[in-house]
Image (cartoon, rainbow, N blue to C red):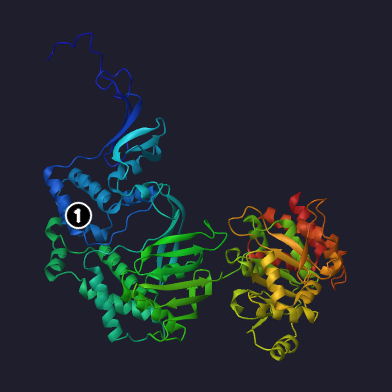
Amino acid sequence: MSEELPASVPGPVPPDERTAWYAPGVRSQYAVSNGIVATVSEQGEGYRYHTRTPSLSEREKAAQERIERRFEDATISRPRTRAGAVERVSDGLPSRLRDRLPELDGRRPASRRRLQYHLLASLRALGDLTPLALDDRVRIADTNADRLAVHTRDFAPAITALPDDTPFLDRFLGERLRRETVPFAGFEIPVTVVRGHLLGADTFEVSYVVEEPDLLPGDRALIETVLDRLLESPPAGILDDEVHSVAERARTLLNRRIGTRPLARLADRLPLPRRSRSGSLTPASRSERLDALTYYVLRDLLGDGKLTIPLRDPAVRSVEVNRVGDRITVVSHRGTTVGDTRMPTTLSIEDTAEFVALTRSLAAEGGVELSVHRPATTVTLERDTKSGRREMHCSVSLPDKAERGHVSITAERETPPTPMALVERNQLDPELVAGIWTAAANRGTVVFVGPVDAEPTAALGAHTPFIPAADRPVEIGAGGSQVDLPHETAITVPRQNGVRDRRIERDALHPDVAVLSGLNTPEALEQLGSVVASGRPAFAAARAADRSLFAHLVSQAGIVQEFTAGVDLVIELPAPDADETATGWVPVSPDDKGAKRNPGLEFERLFDTEGDGSLSSRFARTLAASPETGVGPPAVAFERRRQYVEYLLTEGSTDRERLMGFLADLRTDEAATIERIRNREQ
């Protein structure tokens, strides 16, 4: 062995060197993490990607198999994205899970690390895809023939040994779009919006992931037992503080049932090695498990079951349950990360009894008892979110023999967006906002029209700060909580039936501006006709697919003459998937167009799109006789307000408070406000 190697054998070099005689095909080899080594080799006309994970001995493999069998009935969530898998492995085993793994006790550190990695991959991460998720040199992945291919930082594509149907491939390719927490009863539950990139994996492109605490074997039975005890004997103080009293009582009951055994408590006080105390709960894991179990008790008893978190997420506009066993779906508000997108959640109602209990509970909260004779109803609910309390309209139906029922809940925004926020979302443009502002300041009538998903009521609420502060807006009609009026004198009254009642509302309340948010039927449109016929301005919103269908509703209501004479501006909001922004229209009398026999509505654009883009002369003439003084002609006021809108956009003033403050400054001293703006820009 002391003899020198022959001169024909080169010295050892790293395996990814092209001169390496013992691995001529290896192009790159590097350590990833957790004992994983990745290798990229060149074979034939392409590259191959391979990972080597920590090897297990036969005894370690047997321990892993025993642990995996033990948790077969557990509800342990897996990450929905590659980023989530990296976080899971980085965090390691949670203490409440770690304390149920006596197989890890008494092992050498290297053996414990190897076994812990494989348990993380198989129970809490992405299985065979975990090494690829941890490799930050892997940029993207796709399926190539019947194998998974990856694109690394330096080599692409590189074929792996994994088949194209490897479990959790859709999660590995998932993209995290939004991650926030939703509060409930003192708990913060993470919610993640994920976009999938695996073709054919799901009907939906985007999904809504609710990351509730994991349930270990036996936890569900423990929760049901505590729920029964709480229902039999409600805790003291439940009328004073429902959440606190139930939570404290639940923790007491749960603590008794998961308490450590006497011998285990004695062992904790003795200087014994850890392996002699396996099976007992450490203080950290005990607290984690109590928190997790208490959350489920509060969710099922004081919340809305599996709907608890979606109903309290301010980004969610509607929640839908269509059938037993189907996934619960949600639709987000326009302007969120994936606005107006229907997304399946990770939640579902698994059996008929659970569905019936949910529908009856929601109906009972609205004062309705569901039965065979009354299997469906619609009620109004309220829920607290981190943005405030919001009202919801809930339609429920008991499931039939085919397990078809429904729960459909629609929630309004707690606080409306601002006009500048709508401009940033490409729903409006600055010129149109300035036109609405000018109409409101000149006591004009503005009607917002659009499909349901365009949220015309939210657009109306966004522009209510432009109503003069000294005016008294009165919101008339159902959905009174849907519009947030920032005026001190604002009030809301329910819509009444009959001409006499409408006159009482209109005259006795002395509204300077009528706010009508539910013009969805000819009967409701008659209310608008009654208001504008009296000479009072109105801010209104109507749900209609487009302007022509809305004009048909106006004709059906028989208020064409009142509409053309009293409405100054119609804002046609596009559907969420449309490329264009909203359009402003000025109603035109058929007589003005030489079509005296045409009973329908006609419009002209607010801006001359075929010419110089100037403001409609008809719109300017209509507002010229308004009571607004000291601001010049409407066209001049419009141009100045357009500049104000541009300034607010430049400053990033998209919140309501800053807009209200700016408008207050203009009312107090417009010249001084302009001077302050100029000084800031210099």
Residue 318 x/y as whole percent? 49, 68
Name the residue located 42 percent from the left edge and 50 percent from the top edge.
196
Residue 209 x/y as whole percent? 40, 59
- Quarter of the image where one finds residue 371: bottom left
Element type at marker 1?
Answer: helix
Name the residue located 46 percent from the left edge and 70 percent from the top edge.
311
Front in this rendered view, residue 324 or 73: 324
Residue 22 x/y as whole percent? 24, 20
For residue 346, above or below residue 226:
above
The kind of residue tagged 1 is: Glu
Q: Is residue 297 visible?
A: no
Front in this rendered view, residue 585 or 426: 585
Residue at the limit of the structure toward the top, as seen here: 7
Image position of 363 (left or right of 388) = left
Residue 529 x/y as whole percent? 74, 79
The quarter of the rendered structure image containing the N terminus is top left
Name the residue located 64 percent from the left edge and 81 percent from the top edge.
477
Please give the residue where the numbered disc 1 appears in the rendered image. 68
For residue 509, above or below residue 428:
below
Image position of 147 (left or right of 56) = right
Q: Is residue 243 visible?
A: yes
For residue 427, above or below residue 626:
above
Image position of 286 (left or right of 366) = left
Image position of 656 (left or right of 674) = left
For residue 470, above or below residue 169:
below
